[in-house]
Amino acid sequence: MYETLEIERAGKLATIWMNRPAVFNAFDEQLIAELATACKELDADPTVRVVVLGGRGKHFSAGADLNWMKRASQFTHEQNLDDARKFAGMLRTLSQMSKPTIARVQGAALGGGTGLTAACDMAVAASDAVFSTSEVRFGIIPSAISPYVLRAIGPRHALRYFQSAERIGAERALAIGLVGEVVPVEELDACVGQLVDALLAGGPLAQKAAKELIAAVDGQKIDEIISEETARRIARQRATDEARDGIASFLEKRTPAWLQ
């Protein structure tokens, strides 16, 4: 079904592999479209609990394919806008998946590769990973990826890196919040696996509700309105069959239904 991706399934885990290693998994129109489709497909699959995004070969993603950028530079305004909307829409689809998502990053994660990293819920990086919001060096801006990178690193760091386009090493990416873990290359899969195991231990409906909670509460003033909103959300969640089973299984020292 996919020409630029591979979907690998292992129990309740699905891994989306960007599969253009010859061009360091740089993305073009086709990869963008296929990533959006794959995210929608896996989000709708009840057998999938966690989604990992990775890149085949030595690099996660070198960002935009130069041939695609060259074509885009010749587009009309309407063609350019349509093309940009598809990229922005793919990132939003990835970011808004109802299931936990993990970026598995090695080597280059430049431009849009940094955006893909930030659009996932969490990211694990190999020690050789390198990031950059490099767009200004091409006379453009990291516009489509900006909501996700800003969410990860905040405006102060974004002011520096959006303008300087400096390379960001793995340890620096960890320090500014772009990734959550940095491990030696040979330990990357083991670290991702540990995170997957931790995520699978939680209730799937509770995790979906937790993501929705963050989106609703983040940036809001702490007042009576937000207090009421959080109260309503926990009351609603407590009434679910999943919550009842989760609490009962803890008290009865048994395995909850979602782990059976």
Image (cartoon, rainbow, N blue to C red):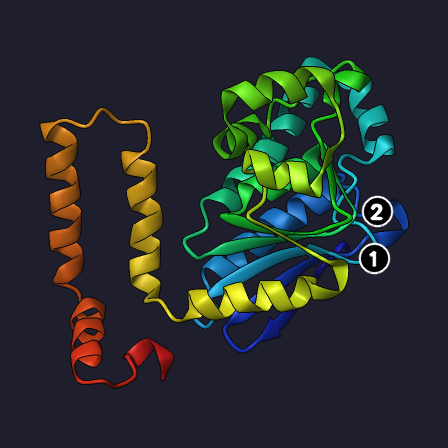
Q: Is residue 89 left or right of residue 141?
A: left
Using the image as rendered, state which of residue 170 and residue 118 is in the foreground.
170
Where 55 falls versus 223 (above or below)?
A: below
Q: Residues within 10 Å of mark 1 (few under 14, many from 20)?
A: some
Q: Are marks 1 and 2 in contact (CB under 8 Å)?
A: yes
Q: Which image quadrant: the C terminus?
A: bottom left
Looking at the rendered structure, the secondary structure element under dot 2 is: loop
Task: List the residue tagged with mark 2.
Answer: 24
Amino acid type, callout 1 = Gly
Looking at the rendered structure, the secondary structure element under dot 1 is: loop
Q: Earlier in the sequence, mark 1 or mark 2?
A: 2
- Residue 101 bears which disc, if any? none
Q: Position of residue 250 (x, y in %)?
A: 21, 77
Amino acid type, callout 2 = Phe
Task: List the residue tagged with mark 1.
Answer: 57
Residue located 82% across and 36% down the image: 65
Residue located 59% across and 59% down the image: 52
